[in-house]
Image (spheres, grey):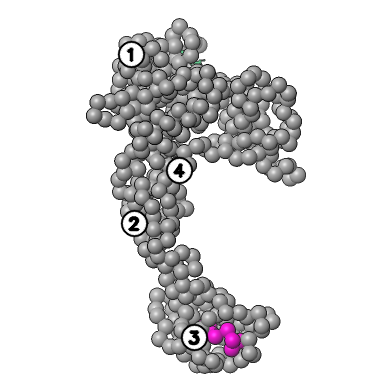
Amino acid sequence: MISVEEAFELIEQHVREIGPLDSTKVAVQDSVGRVLATEIVADVDSPPHHKSVMDGFAVNSADIRSGITQFRVLETIAAGTMPSHTVTSGTTSRIMTGAPMPDGADAVVMVELSSIGYSAPTPDEVTLTWDGPLEKFLSGKHMMEHGQNFARGQAIFPIGHRIRAVDIGLLAEVGASWVEVRRQPTVAVLPTGDELVDCSCQPADSQIRNSNGPMVGAICQNLGTHVTDLGIGADDPADLTARIKVGLDQDVLLLSGGVSAGTLDLVPGILESLNVVQVFHKVKIKPGKPIFFGVRQRDGGRPCLVFGLPGNPVSSLIGVQLFVSTALRLLSGQIPAAPLSLPAVLSTPHQTRGDRPTYWPGRRVRTSGALPGAVEPLPWNGSSDLFSLGQAEGLIQMPPRAQPWAAGERVLFFPLT
Ligand code: AMP
Ligand code: MG
C-alpha cells in the first residue's frame, strides 16, 4: 500500500503528463474562481502621478518648517483635473483627495488645519498651521509618489493564480478587462450502491440517502469545475458500465462506493474492463484507505482521470479534499496545487490508533488564553459520521504513533471550505 505522499506524487506525475487544460478569455467580472493562463502585467503606474491623499492645501514643506503661515492661493485642483500653476514659496493650491500634486509642492496641509472650513469657497489668502513640531512636517506628507504602489510593466498576478473576488479591483485598475484563464475541468459524479436513495426521498429501513453525490459535486464546483450528476449507480455490472461510459467523456470521473473488498464492490473490475489503467488502489490513510486512481486514454481526446472514492461519506470527503482537489488544481494549472495546510497545536490530549496517518475533524479554539493556532479534535465516530464534520472547520493530520498526543503538540490543520 502506498503512502499519502506517494499518492500525491503519482497524481502529480500523471496529471502533468496530460498537461493543463487549454485557455479561453473571460470578462473580468466573470473571472472569480478561474485560474490565470497568462501573467497579468500593469499597463499603468499607480498612482499615475504624485497625488494628494487629503483634501487640503498643496505646499512646499520647507515653507511650513520655516514657520510661514500666510499663503496666497493659486488655484483649486480637483481629482480628474491637471494643475496649471507651480507652487512657489508663500503660495499654495487648494487640492482635493486624489488630485495630481502641482509642481513645486511636496506635501499637503489638511483643510482642517487651515483658516477655512471644509466646504468653504476657496479664498485668495489662507492661513496654514501644523499641529505637530514644525521640523516633523516632512516632504511627502499626505501625498503619494507617482508609481508608489506599482509601475507600468510590473508583474501583478502570476500564471496559475486563482482569481479571488478581492483581486477584481486590481485587475480592473491595470486594465485587464478580459483575462486569459484555463478552461474549467468537467467532472462527472457517480455515487454507487443499492442502498442509496436521492436526498429528496424518505429512506426505507434498509436505505440511506445519497450524501456523497451532492457533497462531492459541491466541493468540485467550489474548486471551479463544471459538474455533471450521473444519478445513482446500482450495484449491478450492466448499470454501472453504462453510467461509467458516460462519465469517461469528462475530464474527471468521480465514483463513490463499491471500491473496497466486498462482493458487491464492482467498481475496480468494471473500470478495468473499460480500459481505465489503475495508477493506485489503496492509500495508507485513515479514513479513506480503499481510494482508487486511474487514467483512461481517449482516441483523439484528452485522457479522463478516474477516482473511486470509498463510500463512507467522510472517506469520500477526505479523498476529494486531499487527492481529487490536487488533480483538479493541476488540470487547471493552479499554483500551488497541493491542499492548504496550516501549522497548528492541539488544544487537548488525543489518542489515535493504527499505523496510518489520521485526518480527524477539528476546529479552531477561540477562547481567550488559548494557545496561538490551537485546534480542538471533535468527538467523532469515524468514517460514516458526517455530523462531526458539520461542526468542524478542518481536518487535523496526525501521523501514526504508539503514544497518545498531548495538548500543545504540533500538528497540521487542513481547512475545509
Ligand atoms: P462501500 O464503499 O460501497 O462499501 O460503502 C461503504 C459505506 O458507505 C456503506 O455503509 C455505504 O452505505 C455508505 N455509502 C456508500 N455510498 C454512499 C453515499 N453516496 N452516501 C452516503 N453513504 C454512502
Ligand atoms: Mg457499496
- The earlier-in-sequence mark between 3 and 1 is 3
Task: Please say whether residue 290 is visible from this viewpoint.
Answer: yes
What is the C-alpha distance between the residues marked 2 and 1?
48 Å
Numbered circles on residues, count = 4
Residue type at the position of mark 1: Ser
Q: Residue at x 47, y 53 (%)?
A: 166
Residue 159, horizontal then vertical, whole percent:
40, 48
In the picture, residue 409 is in which quadrant?
top right
Q: Nearer the viewer, mark 2 or mark 1?
A: 1
Q: Secondary structure at mark 3?
A: loop
Q: Earlier in the sequence, mark 4 or mark 3?
A: 3
Instruction: Confirm or deny contact between disc 4 and disc 1 (CB under 8 A).
Output: no
Q: What segment carries the magenta color?
A: 57-64
* Mark 2 residue type: Ser
How far apart are the two marked residues, 3 and 1, measured between alpha carbons? 80 Å
Q: Are marks 2 and 3 in contact (CB under 8 Å)?
A: no
